[in-house]
Amino acid sequence: MAWSTPEMSPASTPPPGVIDTHAHIYVDRFADDFDAVLARAGAAGVERIVMPATQPSEFERTLRLAEEHPTLHAAIGVHPHHAAEIDNDALNEVERINGEGNTVAVGEIGLDYYYDFAPRERQQEVFRRQLQLARHLDLPAVIHNRESDDDVLRIIEEEQDGTLRFQLHCFGSSMATLQRALELGGTISFTGNVTWLKALPEIVRAVPDDRLMLETDAPYLTPVPHRGRRNEPSYVPLVAERVAALRGQSIDDICRMTSFNARSFFRLPLLLLILLAGAATGRLHAQERPADTSAPAKPTIPYDRTFGIGGHFSSVTFISGSTTIGSGKTGVGLWLSSAPLQSLGVDWLQVDAIYNHSSFEFGDSSYLAVCQIFGECDQPLPRNDHTFLEFSLRFIANPSKPVNFFGSIGITHFHNEFGQDQYIHNKVINGERLLEPNGIENAWGINGSLGLSYSFTLPYFTIVPTAEWTVTAITSERPLSNHKEEFFVSMPRIGLLIYPNFKNLLD
């Protein structure tokens, strides 16, 4: 598949919304036709544009444009070309601006040993400081790397503590550099260079689906067939088309996939996306575009939670009314989890099914006291067994991050066997008339929990240790006359879920 000619340009028949993750459209070269540039981008299906500033003189205009246009987003940083020109006060200003919450990334930062406009030692110092800033503010870093692979990767590795998110923009390095960047948790983006560099096809094919993004780097690196002209965001579908051809995927698949990755990476809001998608659909019908009967591609996500299985341990406390009837008892069980709407890009909602079993018996001293009263010390006394089956909806506050905070709510089915309670009740109160012989009740209730988890991504699995505090309560009528209506269970529990990466396993 060849890349488009002007007549075949995706701008004339826009693909699904695509995001330009790197464009310097705040510079003077766009001053005369800025509104027209945005209009052409919208007509080409570009739904969002990230603008990384490179020096303090660009900060104000970049922030203002992002404030005036909801499809534009600012990133603030100091480029290695300007590392020698700025002092620590300027770096403090980078921190202040990014800390105000109006930016989506720290960037463009990095190293450039091709031009060497600044001493390499100073470049490295400024780069490291801004990586630390990105990590501290929980913002991704947009990284420039030109002929500085070894030092860029070394510094990233030294600063990576598992929370640093970074994008190697305009990637044009070796396969070894790519593999190491991926191991360090990096995301890779390509620009118009994919339409002419002969060394890139293998690299493009090697990037995992969930680490791939697109960009123009406008006004630079204009793709074929427009080389020699000023680059602009409306050309990013040409990059998407070329990447799709190299990877053997459709352009629609690439646009959906890379846009999902960009929204997750930069944490772009979703409401505007829905409105723009509706507008794009209207444009397509107006142009009488033939319907695409192929099944829509499943978007990729940072952490595949299609289906997970695991187990848990808990410390169970039973409360009836205001009385604690059993405290600190061990519970164990099975945990199943799924994100049923993940294929639609909704990775913040999960469905959990949890089985928990807990039992407790009299301690030695209590056992001796009771058995001596009843004269039955030659046989074991009954025990209490409690089985809960929970069905819950889990709402994740930050699904694209390794550390997830969540809350859940759902229903619980109780199966309680009060063997010890019933033994004493019948012996003492009923005089062994055994009015309620088995002490078994089945009831329904509600559950709620708060917790956190951490996601470890491996090639074929995502491993998620989880800690949460769950409270469940019976809400239906209790069948046993000797038990109070109120019955609560408090369970701090630690679980481990394993989510297979089905795509990698099937590949």
Image (cartoon, rainbow, N blue to C red):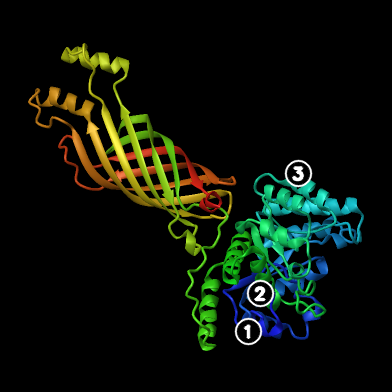
Residue 168 in percent (x, y) is at 73, 58
Q: Closer to the N terminus: mark 3 or mark 1?
A: 1
Judging by the rendered image, the residue that carries numbered circle 3 is 158
Q: Secondary structure at mark 1?
A: loop
Name the residue located 58 percent from the left edge and 49 percent from the top edge.
402
- Give the side of residue 231 with respect to residue 139, left or right: right
Q: What's the distance in space between the residues labelled 3 and 2, CA to CA?
A: 36 Å
Amino acid type of the residue tagged 1 in the rendering? Ser
Q: What's the distance in space between the residues labelled 2 and 1, CA to CA?
A: 10 Å
Pick the front one: 361 or 164: 164
Quarter of the image where the N terminus is located = bottom right
Residue 318 in percent (x, y) is at 32, 35
Q: Where 88 falls versus 390 (above or below)?
A: below
Amino acid type of the residue tagged 2 in the rendering? Pro
**Residue 98 shows in this picture:** no
Name the residue located 48 percent from the left edge and 59 percent from the top edge.
342
Q: Secondary structure at mark 2?
A: helix
Could you classify mark 2 by the number of other residues whose Cα lies within 10 Å: few (under 14), some (14-19), or many (20 or more)? many
Instruction: Classify residue 224 by image quadrant.
Output: bottom right
Q: Residue furthest front?
A: 1
Judging by the rendered image, the residue that carries numbered circle 2 is 237
Judging by the rendered image, the residue that carries numbered circle 1 is 12
